[in-house]
Image: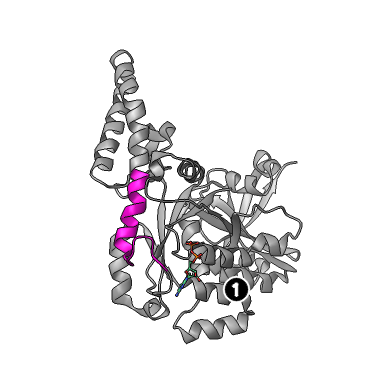
Amino acid sequence: SLTIGIVGLPNVGKSTLFNALTKNDVLAANYPFATIEPNVGVVGVPDPRLARLAEIFGSAKILPATVDFVDIAGIVRGASEGEGLGNKFLANIRESDAICQVIRAFKDENVVHVDGKVSPKDDIETINTELILADLQTIEKVLPRLVKESRIQKDKAAKVKAVEEAKAILEEGNTLFSAGIVQGTEKHEPLHDLHLLTTKPFLYVFNVDEEELTDEAFKNEQRALVAPAEAIFLNAKLEADLAELDDEEALELLQSVGQEEPGLATLARVGFDTLGLQTYLTAGPKETRAWTIKKGATAPEAAGVIHTDFQKGFIKAEVISFDDLIATGSVAEARAAGKARMEGKDYVMADGDVVEFRFNV
Ligand code: GDP
């Protein structure tokens, strides 16, 4: 499955956040015998629709979609020079599908900052500079050969042009992501086999003091720093505390700091979206479940997520939108009201589709 790598300078609260993440580990909760890597946290994507469906269908359990977070240790200035930890750090980032930077904004003088002062802007620059330098090295290694090849193989010209454009963006100190060259898009295609780090989608977690959780002016300033990436604001220590509480106590603590849901819940949802993923839903007496698909997936591709045989033998999907199902109250009522659609193999799945597949075995 797709993973989000968590990176950040030392002492910004990564371990604190990651421990809170692993306490919320849905794999650990739902599959007690699953082997989980120590540096991976599998977090459920909160979706209030699931409980509503489970009620209608009398489901025995609810299985949310999940996001995998990987704790990537070792970013230091000079990581791109590839010494020891630096090498491992870059390799781990290369394996991630998105990059989540944890940025310190909390002030606490008892916690030393590696560069002596708390400055989100400087820290973001420090990390991005390492990633940008690593990409520039990759490009400088392949570009001379590509240029040579393009003299003979004329079809390489477009690739050379794309690589040179990427180089210019990086040399100005910008990530390719911020310039709209992102993995999975057409613009990225010619650069695909270079495995550049800054073409991964980015998201930013600001570890803030509790007062700042509700400080809109402050938050807008940070958002402006990282746009077009998403910014999430949380207090890592508070998240760690929340992970220890039952739902009711957690809600009380959240409300006392003006929040509606834990920062980790927001992080899971935004992370899922940043990875380019969406869900569709199935429901029955056994379970209500959210299944993960790529945005734009067709009905047979969606069926294949449940079982490859479902995709191979796909006939039709009976689709009811979540809203129609809630409005009518049951599958039978939805059918009677003409709200159940039979969709074929070209149907592109929509968010909130409640589905039953018809297939040949
Ligand atoms: P890491 O090096 O990025 O993994 O950082 P840690 O999670 O180990 O945190 C470094 C120190 O900062 C620890 O003493 C934490 O207790 C403290 N810390 C982490 N998050 C917060 C926070 O939100 N507020 C305050 N005041 N301290 C924090």
Q: Main secondary structure of the magenta part?
A: helix
The answer to whether any part of residue 344 appears in the image is no
- Tell me where residue 219 appears, x and y as whole percent: 33, 71
- Tell me where residue 204 appears, x and y as whole percent: 40, 60
Looking at this view, name the residue that lies furthest to the top: 152
**Within 8 Å of ligand 1, the CB of disc 1?**
no
Question: Foreground residue, 71 or 219?
Answer: 71
Question: Foreground residue, 315 or 176?
Answer: 176
Which residue is at a point 44% across and 59% down the rendered structure image? Answer: 10
Which residue is at a point 62% across and 76% down the rendered structure image? Answer: 244
Q: Secondary structure at mark 1?
A: helix
Count of numbered marks: 1
- Tell me where residue 228 appears, x and y as whole percent: 32, 56
Neighbour tally class for label 1: few under 14, some 14-19, many 20 plus, Cα within 10 Å: some
- Dividing the picture into quarters, in which one does residue 233 lie? bottom left
Q: What is the three-letter code of the residue carrying label 1?
A: Ala
Asked if residue 85 is positioned above or below residue 124 in the image, the reply reads above
Name the colouring of the figure. one colour
The reply, left or right, for residue 300 in relation to residue 313 is left
- Dividing the picture into quarters, in which one does residue 100 lie? bottom left
The reply, left or right, for residue 51 in relation to residue 177 is right
- Dividing the picture into quarters, in which one does residue 208 lie? bottom left
Q: Which residue is mark 1?
A: 243
Q: Is-magenta flag for residue 131?
A: yes
Q: Is-magenta flag for residue 14?
A: no
Asked if residue 258 is positioned above or below residue 204 in the image, the reply reads below
- Tell me where residue 115 appears, x and y as whole percent: 34, 60
The answer to whether any part of residue 121 appears in the image is yes
The reply, left or right, for residue 150 in relation to residue 97 is left
Which residue is at a point 38% across and 65% down the rendered structure image? Answer: 113
What residue span does the magenta drawing correspond to?
Answer: 112-132
